[in-house]
Image (cartoon, helix red, strand yellow):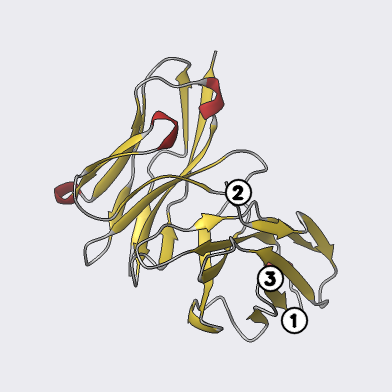
Amino acid sequence: EPEVTQTPSHQVTQMGQEVILRCVPISNHLYFYWYRQILGQKVEFLVSFYNNEISEKSEIFDDQFSVERPDGSNFTLKIRSTKLEDSAMYFCASRTLYNSPLHFGNGTRLTVT
Amino acid sequence: AQSVTQPDIHITVSEGASLELRCNYSYGATPYLFWYVQSPGQGLQLLLKYFSGDTLVQGIKGFEAEFKRSQSSFNLRKPSVHWSDAAEYFCAVGAGAAGNKLTFGGGTRVLVKP
C-alpha cells in the first residue's frame, strides 16, 4: 500500500538555525498538510497546501514557517530560525480528492537545543 | 471553533476483553469524524471515518465506531482486544471542505494485559 514518507526521522538542531523537513506524499494525492505534536500535547494543524499554494494555515504558522512543493514529489516544511518551542513531532499528510481521509507519515522528531 | 475531548488518558484492558474509547466533539455543522491509531515510533494510521449515512461505521483491525449526534459522541469499540492493539488512539473532527483541517483530541493510551 502506498504511504507518505518523511525524512529524517529525527533531527537535532541548534536554536536559531534553519531546518527543512521533507515529505514525499502519496503520488496521486493533491492536498498536502503539516501537523505537529509537542510532547504531551495534542496533534495540531499547521498548514494545508493545494494547487501550489497555501489553502489554510493556523496561527502557529507564522513568518518563520514556509512550505514548498519544489518538484512533483516532495513537500517541504522550512523553519527559518528555530526556537526551543519548535521542538515537536512534525507529521506530513496527504489526501486525494474531496471527501477522502488524510494519510499521515511516520513523522520527524525535531529537537531544538 | 471545533474541539474534541477524549476523557480517558489511559485505559488498561485484558487481552480478549472488549474495549470502548470515548470521544466527544464540538462542531457547529455536520462533522466529519475520524479515529486514528499511533503505535510507538509510527505515524497516524486511519482506523475508520464517518462522513454521512449509517451511523455505525466499520474500520480496520476489527474496530467500529458509532456516531451519536444527540450526544455529540463518536465512541470507538472493539469486541475482543489483541495484544497488538496496545497503542495510542486519537479521535479527530474535520472542518472545512470535507474535513480539510483536522482537530484532534488528546489521545487515549491503551495498555493490554496478557
Q: CA distance from mark 3 to mark 2?
A: 18 Å
Q: Nearer the viewer, residue B27 or B94?
A: B94
* The N terminus of chain B lies in quadrant: bottom left
Name the amino acid, label 3.
Asn
What number is the disc on residue A96?
Answer: none
Q: Nearer the viewer, residue A91 or B3?
A: A91
Q: Chain of mark 2?
A: B
User: Would you say residue B75 is visible in this rendering?
Assistant: yes
Q: Which residue is mark 3?
A: A74
Q: Percent position (x, y) of residue A26?
A: 58, 60
Q: Are marks 3 and 2 on the same chain?
A: no
Is the residue A54 above or below the residue A20 in the image? below
Q: Residue visible at 27% across and 63% down?
A: B27
* The C terminus of chain B lies in quadrant: top right
Element class at badge 3: loop
Q: How many neighbours does mark 2 have within 10 angstroms: few (below 14), some (14-19), or many (20 or more)? A: many
Q: Which residue is mark 2?
A: B43
Name the amino acid, label 2.
Gly
**Disc on the earlier residue, 1 or 3:** 3
Contact? badges 3 and 2 (CB < 8 Å):
no
Image check: A80 left or right of B90?
right
Is the residue B98 above or below the residue B114 in the image? below
Q: Chain of mark 1?
A: A
Q: How many neighbours does mark 3 have within 10 angstroms: few (below 14), some (14-19), or many (20 or more)? A: some
Q: Percent position (x, y) of residue B52?
A: 22, 54
Q: How many neighbours does mark 1 have within 10 angstroms: few (below 14), some (14-19), or many (20 or more)? A: some
User: Would you say residue A42 is visible in this rendering?
Assistant: no
Image check: A73 left or right of B36?
right
Q: Percent position (x, y) of residue B15?
A: 48, 16
